[in-house]
Image (spheres, rainbow, N blue to C red):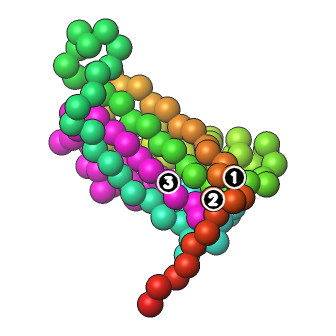
Amino acid sequence: MPHIIVEYSSNIEPTCCAADLLQSVHQAALDSGIFEPSAVRTRAAPRSLYLVGQNTDPTAGFIHITARIRPGRTTETLESLLRALVDSTEGYLRTANYAAPLMLNVEIDELPALRLGSRLFN
């Protein structure tokens, strides 16, 4: 834990490099100090079938980040993580000079304790 999933509309590439975006988000989670560094897992999922708004602008895209974490953190900690993920994504987009319309959403999903089960396989 945590699992951070970055979904994005495929039209943001090639302006945005998915690997660089993923690295930026991953580093923000590491830098937050909230998680054991070896436990952070970040992955990207490009979406080739999507609609944005009224579907009138073919350049309009999206990035949706979900952080699936264990329960029990304070509201302040959750807000701090949310802000770190937003800031890192916006910072990357500025660095990449991304200029097309884009919707950015970030959510934190606290998993119920009963769903928490992981095992390290060697």
Q: Earlier in the sequence, mark 2 or mark 3?
A: 3
Tell me the kind of residue under disc 2: Arg
Instruction: Classify the position of the N terminus by image quarter.
Output: bottom right
> Which residue is located at x 47 percent, y 85 percent?
121
Image disc number at residue 115 = 2
| Residue at image point 54% right, 66% down | 40
Of the 4 image quadrants, the one containing the C terminus is: bottom left
Does the image show residue 47? yes
Q: Residue at x 64, y 63 (%)?
A: 116
Percent position of residue 52, x then y = 32, 20
Q: Amino acid at mark 1?
A: Pro
- Where is mark 1, residue-wise? 112
- Magenta-colored stretch includes residue 7: yes
Residue at disc 3, secondary structure: strand
10 Å crowding of disc 3: few (<14), some (14-19), many (20+):
many
Q: Nearer the viewer, residue 117 or 66?
A: 117
- Whether the residues at callouts 1 and 2 have beta carbons within 8 Å, the answer is yes
Amino acid type, residue under disc 3 in the picture: Ile
Pointer 2 with pointer 3, Cβ within 8 A? no
> Would you say residue 32 is visible in this rendering?
no
Residue with the most extreme front position: 114
| Numbered range of the magenta stretch | 1-25
- Of the image marks 3 and 1, the number of the one nearer the N terminus: 3
Q: Label 1 vs label 2: CA separation?
A: 6 Å
The residue pinned by badge 3 equals 4
Label 1 crowding class (10 Å Cα cut-off): few <14, some 14-19, many 20+? few
Which type of secondary structure does the marked residue at label 2 adopt?
helix
* Residue 30, placed above or below residue 16: below
The spot of residue 30 in percent (x, y) is 57, 64
Task: Provide residue 82's location: percent of width, then percent of height.
Answer: 62, 42
Q: Alpha-carbon distance for marks 2 and 3? A: 16 Å
Q: Nearer the viewer, residue 82 or 98?
A: 82
